[in-house]
Image (cartoon, grey):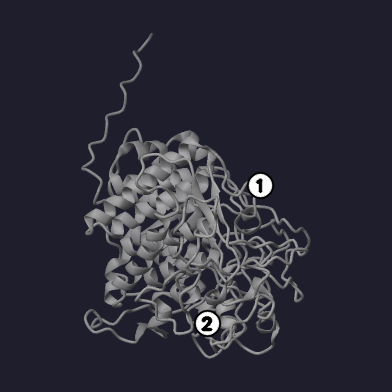
Amino acid sequence: MSMYGRDPWGGPLEIAADSATDDDRSRNLQDYDKGALSSRQLDETQQSWLLGPTEQKKKKKYVDLGCIIVSRKIFVWTVGTILAAAGKLPKHNNVSWRGNSCLNDGKGDSGSTFKDLKGGFYDAGDAIKFHFPKSFAMTMLSWSVIEYSAKYEAAGELNHVKEIIKWGTDYFLKTFNSSADSISMLVYQVGSGDTSGGSTTPNDHYCWMRPEDIDYPRPVKTCSSCSDLAAEMAAALASASIVFKDNKAYSQKLVHGAKTLYKFARDQRGRYSEGNEAATFYNSTMYWDEFVWGGAWLYYATGNNSYLTIATHPKMAKHAGAFWGGPDYGVLSWDNKLAGAQVLLSRLRLFLSPGYPYEEILSAFHNQTNIIMCSYLPYFNSFNRTKGGLIELTHGRPQPLQYVVNAAFLATLYSDYLEASDTPGWTCGPNFYSTNVLRTFARTQIDYILGKNPRKMSYLVGFGNHYPKHVHHRGASIPKNKVKYSCKGGWKWRDTKKGNPNTIVGAMVAGPDSRDGFRDVRTNYNYTEPTLAGNAGLVAALVALSGEKSVGIDKNTMFSAVPPLFPNPPPPPAPWKP
């Protein structure tokens, strides 16, 4: 049974040259394609990913990743350029072709109690704020900072990435009554994208406009039973509270908000996307995985065992699909947090080993994590490879790269966990594999994205000599020429054969098809649209792979709020009876 949404549009799953001209297909994984290509072993690469040892103090323009030189703008924050920030732009904005936008979000909606919703990030090539994938993006960024803050610092970018996380969390605190202990409502989306084809009412998909020029109403959409979104946003705030632990007042504010959201998620059950427009774009298939994920992050943020009890409850694990298997098992995404939660809780077992009553499920999660890592290797048939070597986590479905970068991050992170616990590797069936195998997997996938593929195409805009020039992104495709193009007036920029006037440096596009093919066509978002969640995973993977292997993870910061553990003794055995 797949834990991903079906394709709401039906039809073939292969990317067609005449694919729809607007963002009207769900970005979720869709129906399983059994016709994917057969598995092939990848070519190993000998590239080392080294940060120069003298970079701590002087900020350089480039980061040295061995054979690959990545410009600092790309390495650090691909998201800032893609979506830049919404609202009144922060001082750290470095995108010359962006300006303040949508400053009236919330104000014009007479029925909303949330009057200040400017800020945050736009989702992708449009100007909608989808809070579900945005929360996941911020959680992934925070996770990477907690584990690899020394690597960010070595690159001279720790403060920058923290500014970006804070821009996201400051916005989330506006989407509910964050000062209250309990709430009954949460904003799940700002903006709208009618994809029916019959409507000509201006909205964020029908119109092709720079965000700075938007003058049509942008609705505020709220939910009262949205467990998945609330638990994911709780994870975002809880993880960020660890990032900002040195700012005690702000960290506590984030923790309080996370607690409030998680209580709301548990008390008023439901899927945020049920019966509304969000199902078309970011449909959530369940909320049990977010309960495990959010509970784990709240435990790390607070040290409160009640959250760990929820996250490790056997029924919770069962409902979340921890033991289901299936074609999409082990694929971390904005919809399915299970693989991430299992890696996150395996960390607890490897380094603190809390014992009874958590050991049974922690051991099971640890075992499932090992199985997931096995599934990423080319020696197994869980996922096929394209001829060029890209793992097909989407089984031939479009927009593969956002899932690939998440897997590269998990694989590298888990190899670092094993190294830090003096474990040289893990077993897949009768075979033992060293941690280097996981790093090789992650490296080959990132190398593919950066240009080591049959088309010699870099899927990271601005990197290399051959990268997409027709990125599906409104702001990048319209020149900053002091002309305000109307809703339909911007269509000429959408449909032109010319490349984008603005280079969206650092944007990772959706990616190639299952035959390593790619069409650099602006109207085909299945190839050329970047997303917030995809770039967050890319940054996490890049920072994990950068630097010398000996640098590894920060073992202790994750546990800074966790008190010393004294495992409870198991219950006594039942009285012996003859």
Give the CA separation, mark 2 to mark 1.
Answer: 36 Å
Across and down, in percent, residue 8 comes to: 72, 55
Q: Left or right: where does residue 401 sit relative to residue 361?
A: right
The secondary element bearing badge 2 is classed as loop
* Front residue of 20 and 378: 20
The picture places residue 195, in percent across and down from the top left corner, at: 71, 62
Residue 578, label in figure: none
Circle number at residue 461: 2
Residue tagged 1: 275
Tell me the residue at 65%/60% (across/down). Answer: 26
* Mark 1 Cα-neighbour bin, 10 Å: few <14, some 14–19, many ≥20: few
- Which circle's residue, 2 or 1, is located before the other in the chain? 1
Residue displayed at 30% across by 21% down: 572
Q: Amino acid at mark 1?
A: Gly
Picture coordinates of residue 117 (x, y %)?
Answer: 46, 60
Mark 2: amino acid: Val
Q: Quadrant of residue 511?
A: bottom right
Residue at left offset 36%, top offset 40%: 181
What is the tally of numbered marks visible in this picture? 2
Q: Quadrant of the C terminus?
A: top left
Q: Is residue 543 above or below residue 359?
A: below
For label 2, count other residues whose C-alpha is less than 10 Å away and answer few (under 14), some (14-19) or many (20+): many
Element marked by disc 1: loop
Q: Can residue 304 be spotted in the picture?
A: yes
